[in-house]
């Protein structure tokens, strides 16, 4: 009863994913113009950059700006094609088809954001490729359907090129389908503005957090896989503005979050102690 099952697939209301309120986003370069031009040309997007530098916030902002529903999938090493496309489930003794997030985004002409795409299993690329080139189609094998993506559909993926591992590299056949936008931690003046807005911290403490961020970022590849991201600074700032003592806040939100290496944690704590 495939026909019956497909009816069940359409129960999702795309407006659920609409972002009503303008997300706070500070542009850091020409990313808005690039995104809009790519979107108008039905080109998929690849957001490159370290974790916690604003890629997800940017996507939320663009979804709001373009008034499109957005579905975000955090990819992990168990993520299969069926997780993205959909599967048959047994509900009340009846077999029903349930669309996966990618299918829902295609059907509703929305934005699908696949966060940290290289984490997903390699076979998921099978569904992404035909959607990411000019065919813009999505085969749903189990339903015997071939969905054509409407013009308003947009596929965006994120990727952190900083991880030094061949297993975590994006293949040429995948990457060459996308328009890439490069992200990095915002420049100090912008990052300062962002942290103050997100945490309500005073300028003096914010500047100390920025200094600490710079120091940890210099330790990248010198004992740290990544420096403190904007996200971690925001976390520390939020703890401080709730009354947590700054050293404790930085230790919890930054030092321990960055690494498990006890020497490294001690070194970062020393930096924290010197600043606060
Ligand atoms: P990513 O998706 O790159 O891992 P996020 O988008 O989740 O990172 O960013 C982490 C946090 O940093 C956000 O929740 C937000 O508080 C802040 N942030 C980073 N960049 C910006 C920006 N340009 N404008 C506003 N907030 C930002």
Image (cartoon, helix red, strand yellow):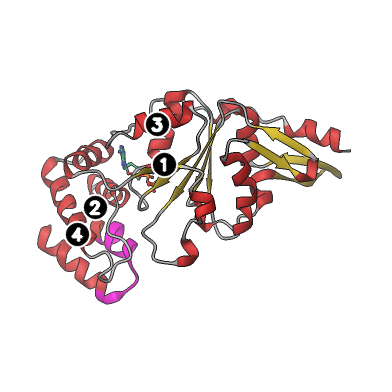
Q: Along the line of sight, which residue is nearer the eye, 56 or 19?
A: 56
Disc 3 C-beta below 8 A from ligand 1: yes
Query: Does any atom of ligand 1 lie closer than 8 Å to the CB of label 1?
Result: yes
CA distance separating discs 2 and 4: 8 Å
In front: mark 2 or mark 4? 4
The answer to the question of whether label 2 and label 1 lie on touching residues, with beta carbons closer than 8 A, is no
Report crowding for label 4: few under 14, some 14 to 19, many 20 or more residues within 10 A (C-alpha): some
Residue 68 in picture, x, y percent from top left: 51, 26
Using the image, tell me which numbered label, if any, was put on residue 247.
Answer: 4
**Which mark is first along the chain, 4 or 1?**
1
Q: Which residues are magenta?
A: 251-263
* Residue at 25% across, 62% down: 251
How far, Cα to Cα, is label 2 from label 3? Answer: 31 Å
Judge whether residue 258 is colored magenta.
yes
Residue pointed to by mark 2: 244
Residue indicated by mark 1: 56
65 above or below 133? above
Q: Quadrant of the N terminus?
A: top right
Q: Secondary structure at mark 1?
A: helix
User: What is the secondary structure assignment of the residue under circle 2?
Assistant: loop
Q: Nearer the viewer, mark 2 or mark 3?
A: 3
- Please report contact status of discs 2 and 3: CB closer than 8 Å, yes or no: no
Query: Mostly what secondary structure, the magenta segment?
Result: helix
Cα distance, mark 3 to mark 4? 33 Å
In the rendered image, the residue lying farthest to the right is 1
Q: What secondary structure is marked by label 3?
A: helix
**Above or below: residue 73 compared with residue 23:** below
* Nearer mark to the viewer, of 2 and 1: 1
As for residue 183 lying within the magenta part, the answer is no
**Kind of element beneath mark 4:** helix
């Amino acid at each position: 009863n495939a026909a019956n099952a497909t009816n069940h697939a359409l129960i999702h209301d795309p407006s659920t994913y609409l972002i009503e309120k303008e997300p706070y986003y500070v542009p850091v370069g020409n990313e808005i113009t690039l995104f809009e031009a790519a979107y108008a040309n039905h080109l998929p997007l690849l957001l490159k950059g370290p974790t916690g530098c604003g890629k997800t916030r940017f996507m939320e902002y663009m979804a709001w700006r373009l008034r499109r529903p957005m579905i975000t999938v955090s990819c992990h090493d168990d993520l299969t094609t069926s997780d993205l496309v959909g599967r048959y489930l047994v509900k009340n003794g009846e077999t029903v088809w349930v669309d996966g997030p990618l299918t829902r985004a295609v059907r509703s002409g929305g934005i699908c954001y696949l966060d940290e795409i290289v984490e997903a299993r390699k076979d998921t690329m099978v569904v992404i490729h035909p959607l990411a080139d000019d065919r813009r189609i999505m085969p749903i094998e189990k339903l015997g359907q071939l969905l054509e993506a409407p013009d308003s559909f947009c596929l965006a993926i994120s990727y952190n090129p900083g991880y030094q591992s061949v297993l975590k590299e994006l293949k040429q056949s995948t990457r060459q389908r996308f328009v890439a936008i490069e992200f990095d931690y915002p420049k100090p003046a912008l990052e300062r503005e962002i942290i103050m807005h997100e945490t309500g911290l005073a300028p003096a403490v914010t500047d100390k957090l920025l200094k600490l961020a710079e120091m940890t970022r210099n330790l990248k590849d010198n004992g740290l896989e990544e420096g403190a991201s904007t996200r971690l600074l925001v976390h520390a700032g939020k703890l401080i503005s709730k009354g947590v003592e700054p050293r404790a806040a930085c230790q919890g939100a930054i030092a321990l979050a960055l690494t498990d290496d006890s020497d490294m944690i001690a070194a970062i704590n020393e930096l924290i102690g010197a600043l606060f």
